[in-house]
Amino acid sequence: MEFFLAWIVCAFICAFVASSKGRSFVGWFFLGLLLPIVSLLALIAVPSLRAPAYIEKEQRQAARDSKKCPECAEIVRRDAKVCRFCGHRFNPERLIFSDGVVAQKAYKGIPYTLFDDRHVEANVGDRAMKWPNTNAFKSYVDTIR
Protein backbone atom coordinates (compact mmCIF):
# COMPACT_ATOMS: atom_id res chain seq x y z
CA MET A 1 0.00 0.00 0.00
CA GLU A 2 2.83 2.43 0.85
CA PHE A 3 4.53 1.57 -2.40
CA PHE A 4 1.35 2.38 -4.37
CA LEU A 5 0.95 5.69 -2.52
CA ALA A 6 4.61 6.62 -3.19
CA TRP A 7 4.07 5.77 -6.85
CA ILE A 8 1.08 8.17 -7.11
CA VAL A 9 2.95 10.91 -5.21
CA CYS A 10 5.90 10.53 -7.57
CA ALA A 11 3.54 10.91 -10.55
CA PHE A 12 2.07 14.11 -9.06
CA ILE A 13 5.54 15.50 -8.33
CA CYS A 14 6.51 14.76 -11.90
CA ALA A 15 3.36 16.51 -13.17
CA PHE A 16 3.90 19.60 -10.99
CA VAL A 17 7.54 19.96 -12.04
CA ALA A 18 6.55 19.59 -15.70
CA SER A 19 3.79 22.16 -15.29
CA SER A 20 6.21 24.65 -13.73
CA LYS A 21 8.43 24.23 -16.80
CA GLY A 22 5.54 24.95 -19.15
CA ARG A 23 4.92 21.31 -20.06
CA SER A 24 1.68 19.29 -20.00
CA PHE A 25 0.50 18.44 -16.48
CA VAL A 26 -1.70 15.53 -17.62
CA GLY A 27 0.82 14.05 -20.05
CA TRP A 28 3.66 14.05 -17.54
CA PHE A 29 1.33 12.72 -14.82
CA PHE A 30 0.59 9.63 -16.91
CA LEU A 31 4.24 9.32 -17.87
CA GLY A 32 5.04 9.51 -14.16
CA LEU A 33 2.59 6.69 -13.51
CA LEU A 34 4.21 4.50 -16.16
CA LEU A 35 7.87 5.30 -15.45
CA PRO A 36 8.10 7.29 -12.20
CA ILE A 37 11.86 7.50 -11.64
CA VAL A 38 12.76 7.73 -15.33
CA SER A 39 10.28 10.57 -15.91
CA LEU A 40 11.65 12.54 -12.94
CA LEU A 41 15.17 12.16 -14.28
CA ALA A 42 13.97 13.19 -17.75
CA LEU A 43 12.38 16.33 -16.31
CA ILE A 44 15.71 17.37 -14.87
CA ALA A 45 17.21 17.34 -18.37
CA VAL A 46 14.22 18.91 -20.17
CA PRO A 47 14.51 22.70 -20.59
CA SER A 48 11.73 25.04 -19.57
CA LEU A 49 9.37 26.34 -22.25
CA ARG A 50 8.60 29.50 -20.31
CA ALA A 51 10.74 32.58 -20.77
CA PRO A 52 12.04 34.05 -17.53
CA ALA A 53 10.23 37.19 -16.35
CA TYR A 54 13.26 39.41 -16.92
CA ILE A 55 13.39 38.42 -20.61
CA GLU A 56 9.71 39.29 -21.07
CA LYS A 57 10.32 42.65 -19.37
CA GLU A 58 13.27 43.37 -21.68
CA GLN A 59 11.18 42.47 -24.73
CA ARG A 60 8.38 44.82 -23.67
CA GLN A 61 10.90 47.60 -23.07
CA ALA A 62 12.53 47.00 -26.46
CA ALA A 63 9.14 47.17 -28.18
CA ARG A 64 8.44 50.53 -26.52
CA ASP A 65 11.84 51.91 -27.49
CA SER A 66 11.71 50.89 -31.16
CA LYS A 67 9.96 51.73 -34.40
CA LYS A 68 9.74 50.16 -37.84
CA CYS A 69 11.48 51.75 -40.81
CA PRO A 70 8.94 52.56 -43.56
CA GLU A 71 11.44 51.70 -46.32
CA CYS A 72 12.95 48.36 -45.29
CA ALA A 73 10.59 47.36 -42.42
CA GLU A 74 13.48 46.69 -40.05
CA ILE A 75 13.18 47.54 -36.36
CA VAL A 76 15.32 50.49 -35.25
CA ARG A 77 15.52 52.57 -32.09
CA ARG A 78 12.73 55.10 -31.63
CA ASP A 79 15.12 58.06 -31.41
CA ALA A 80 17.02 57.08 -34.59
CA LYS A 81 17.21 59.79 -37.24
CA VAL A 82 18.59 57.45 -39.94
CA CYS A 83 17.82 53.75 -40.45
CA ARG A 84 21.00 51.74 -39.93
CA PHE A 85 19.90 49.11 -42.47
CA CYS A 86 18.81 51.13 -45.52
CA GLY A 87 19.84 54.72 -44.71
CA HIS A 88 16.26 56.09 -44.72
CA ARG A 89 16.07 59.50 -43.05
CA PHE A 90 13.16 59.85 -40.66
CA ASN A 91 11.21 63.09 -40.80
CA PRO A 92 11.82 64.80 -37.45
CA GLU A 93 8.24 66.10 -37.42
CA ARG A 94 6.96 62.51 -37.61
CA LEU A 95 8.93 61.26 -34.62
CA ILE A 96 6.59 60.05 -31.91
CA PHE A 97 7.23 61.50 -28.49
CA SER A 98 5.73 60.44 -25.18
CA ASP A 99 2.01 59.58 -24.93
CA GLY A 100 1.68 59.24 -28.71
CA VAL A 101 2.39 62.92 -29.44
CA VAL A 102 3.87 63.32 -32.92
CA ALA A 103 4.16 67.11 -33.13
CA GLN A 104 3.09 70.33 -31.51
CA LYS A 105 2.44 73.09 -34.02
CA ALA A 106 0.31 76.19 -34.51
CA TYR A 107 -2.19 77.10 -37.24
CA LYS A 108 -3.36 80.72 -37.56
CA GLY A 109 -2.17 81.43 -34.04
CA ILE A 110 -3.86 78.42 -32.42
CA PRO A 111 -1.43 75.87 -31.00
CA TYR A 112 -2.41 72.23 -31.53
CA THR A 113 -1.06 68.77 -30.81
CA LEU A 114 -0.93 66.03 -33.45
CA PHE A 115 -1.02 62.42 -32.19
CA ASP A 116 0.25 59.20 -33.79
CA ASP A 117 -3.30 58.06 -34.64
CA ARG A 118 -3.65 61.33 -36.62
CA HIS A 119 -6.16 63.01 -34.29
CA VAL A 120 -5.63 66.63 -33.29
CA GLU A 121 -6.23 68.28 -29.92
CA ALA A 122 -6.25 72.03 -29.31
CA ASN A 123 -7.56 74.64 -26.90
CA VAL A 124 -9.83 77.01 -28.80
CA GLY A 125 -10.89 79.86 -26.59
CA ASP A 126 -11.36 78.28 -23.20
CA ARG A 127 -12.46 74.86 -24.47
CA ALA A 128 -10.31 71.77 -25.11
CA MET A 129 -11.40 70.26 -28.43
CA LYS A 130 -10.54 67.17 -30.48
CA TRP A 131 -10.66 66.54 -34.27
CA PRO A 132 -10.17 63.28 -36.20
CA ASN A 133 -7.44 64.73 -38.43
CA THR A 134 -5.52 67.87 -39.34
CA ASN A 135 -7.80 68.82 -42.23
CA ALA A 136 -10.87 68.85 -39.97
CA PHE A 137 -9.00 71.02 -37.47
CA LYS A 138 -7.83 73.50 -40.12
CA SER A 139 -11.28 73.78 -41.70
CA TYR A 140 -12.76 74.50 -38.26
CA VAL A 141 -10.14 77.17 -37.58
CA ASP A 142 -10.81 78.69 -41.03
CA THR A 143 -14.51 79.04 -40.19
CA ILE A 144 -13.88 80.81 -36.90
CA ARG A 145 -11.01 83.07 -38.09
Image (cartoon, grey):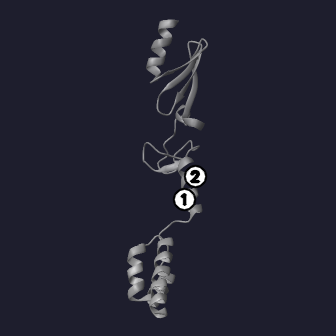
The answer to whether residue 71 is visible is yes
**Residue placed at 56% from the left, 44% from the top?**
78
Q: Which label was assigned to residue 115?
A: none
- CA separation, marks 2 and 1? 9 Å
Q: Residues within 10 Å of mark 1 (few under 14, many from 20)?
A: few
Compared to residue 115, the image places residue 40 above or below, namely: below
Among the 4 quarters of the image, the one containing residue 96: top right
Task: Judge whether residue 97 can be spotted in this image.
Answer: no
Q: Is residue 35 left or right of residue 77?
A: left
Residue ID for mark 1: 56
**Residue appearing at x 47%, y 90% in the figure:** 37
Residue nearest the viewer, comparing 54 with 112:
54
Residue at 56% from the left image edge and 12% from the top image edge: 108
- Looking at this view, name the residue that lies furthest to the front: 1
- Of mark 2 and mark 1, the one earlier in the sequence is 1
Percent across and percent down for residue 14 are 47, 81
Q: Position of residue 142 (x, y in %)?
A: 48, 9
Viewer-proximal residue, 81 or 75? 75
Residue bearing mark 2 = 61
* Amino acid type shown at disc 1: Glu
Circle 2 residues within 10 Å: few <14, some 14–19, many ≥20: few
